[in-house]
Amino acid sequence: MTRENKFIGILFECCNIYRRIYMNKGKNAYEGKCPQCNGEVKVKIGPDGTETRFFSAR
């Protein structure tokens, strides 16, 4: 069985680090933390969605 973990790419501008963040259990947002400073990011999933897979967070 293949497990599919949906993710988006985030550039954490606070520490200039790129990471993947994954869809939460409720499947209504992508959530993650900067691995260096622990800054949190949450990207809500809208009804129309987007084709963009890479974002920046400050």
Image (spheres, grey):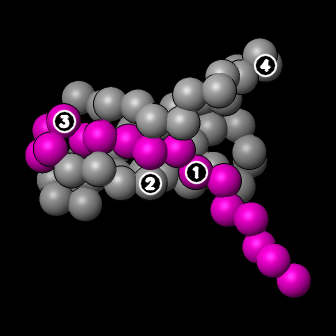
Q: Spatial distance from mark 4 to mark 3, Cα to Cα? A: 27 Å
Counting residues from the start of the chain, the first of labels 1 and 3 encountered is 1
Q: Upstream in the sequence, badge 2 or badge 3?
A: 3
Q: Earlier in the sequence, mark 4 or mark 2?
A: 2
Residue 3 position within the rendered picture, expressed as x and y whole percent measured from the top left: 77, 73
Quadrant of the drawing holding the C terminus: top left
Mark 4 vs mark 1, CA separation in Å: 17 Å
* Residue segment shown in magenta: 1-16
Q: Are marks 4 and 1 in contact (CB under 8 Å)?
A: no
Q: Characterize the local packing of mark 1: few (<14), some (14-19) or many (20 or more) Cα atoms within 10 angstroms.
A: some
Q: Name the residue under label 1.
A: 7
Q: Judging from the image, what secondary structure is the residue with disc 2 in?
A: strand
Q: Counting residues from the N terminus, which is met first, the one under dot 4 or under dot 3?
A: 3
Circle 2 residue: 20
Residue 13 numbered mark, or none: 3
Image coordinates of residue 27 in percent, x first then y, are: 74, 45
Query: Is residue 5 part of the magenta span, yes or no?
Result: yes
